[in-house]
Structures are given as C-alpha cells and as structure tokens.
Image: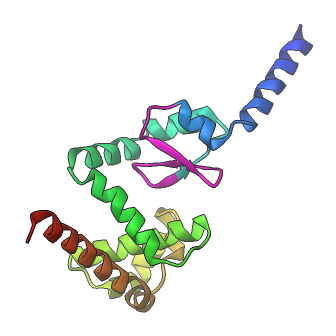
Amino acid sequence: ETMCAANDKMDVSKKAKNVSASDRVKQYSLGVLHSDGGKLFCIYCNVTVDHYRKSSVDRHLDSSTHRKRKVEIQSTTANDSLAKKQKMVTSLFQKSTENREAQNYLNFELTEAFVCANISLEKLDNKKLREFLRRHVTNGGAIPSSAELKREYLPKVAECHKQEIMELIKRSGC
C-alpha cells in the first residue's frame, strides 16, 4: 500500500504539471485571471502567477496585496478604463516579449506616478532610492535612469493622457 500511495502522489504531481494556464483560469471566478502565451496573469495585480500549482494561485489570491488592489480597482468606476489604458499603453510600444512588455508597463506606470505626484524623475537616480528599489521591489533593479524614462516613457505617458482626454471630450459631446 505504501508503494501505491507513493505512485498516486507521483501521478498527482504529473497532472499538476500538465494543467495549462487557460485550464487554471476556468477553475476561478470570471474576471480574476486570464491566460496569454501559456502564462497565467492576475487581472488586478498585472503580474504572472504560477499556474502549475493551485496552491500558488490560491496564495496569490489570498495575499493582502491582491485583496488591496482588487478593492482599489472595484471601488473606482475606472475599471473599464484601466483595461483600456493597459491596451493603449501596450500599443504604444513595439511588439516585444511578455517580460519586456511587463517591464515597459512597469516603467510607464512609474513615470506616470511620478509625474502625477509632481515628483522629479531625477529622484530615481538617487543611490539610496535605487538600492531600496533593487532590494524591495520586484524587478526594481531593472528600472532605467531618469534620462531614459524621460526619453522613452514620458512622451508615451503624455500620449496616453491625451488619448484619455480626447475620449472624455468625445463622450461629453463637445
């Protein structure tokens, strides 16, 4: 019987590895996860989640970061505009790998946050802040210099905001 139990455990792990990202999406409520290119993404957090283990997905969905982000998005009426904004932002960049696209979006959001908060992008060149970001933020070490953010991302932030304003004008009928 011990041998059978060990074989059952092996079969379970094999089955878990064969679960696709799209299969995992079907196991959860609609609109929380989506799959693209064989990867599983959390819609609220805009991060990839390990789809091989259900426990990894459950842990992410139970995390305080996910719950906080979900509440923030659901409490705003901008839920549709967030999805639209993500599509607009990705269309501003040439087609690239998913990881590069995620990094582009991180850099775009960082630039946008600093601009909206009226914080100079040069603050990101500070050694202490760079070290903090590298240690405590996922992919924080990959954030480019302020000069590159100004050159590559600031015009895209401006373009995205211009598109949002034009959309608002269109909707208001002016």
Residue 38 left/right relative to 42: right
Residue at the spot 37% in from the left edge and 81% down from the top edge: 156
Using the rendered image of the protein, determine whether residue 132 is visible from the camera's viewpoint.
no
Q: Nearer the viewer, residue 126 or 5?
A: 5
- Across and down, in percent, residue 143 comes to 48, 77
Give the magenta part as a residue range.
Answer: 28-47
Give the image location of residue 130, x and y in percent: 45, 78
Does the magenta-highlighted stretch encompass residue 41? yes
Residue 35 visible from this viewpoint: yes
Q: Residue furthest top?
A: 1
- 55 or 74: nearer the eye? 74
**Among the 4 quarters of the image, the one containing residue 84:** bottom left
- Who is closer to the viewer here, 71 or 32? 32
Seen in the picture, residue 26 relative to 122 is either above or below; the reply is above
Q: Is residue 68 magenta?
A: no
Q: Position of residue 148 (x, y in %)?
A: 45, 89
Q: Is residue 125 left or right of residue 8?
A: left
Q: Residue at x 87, y 20 (%)?
A: 7
Give the camera-side residue of 136 and 21: 21
State the image quarter where residue 21 is shown: top right
Of the 4 image quadrants, the one containing the C terminus is bottom left
Residue 147 against residue 157 in the figure, above or below:
below
Pinpoint residue 171: horizontal percent, then vertical percent. 15, 63
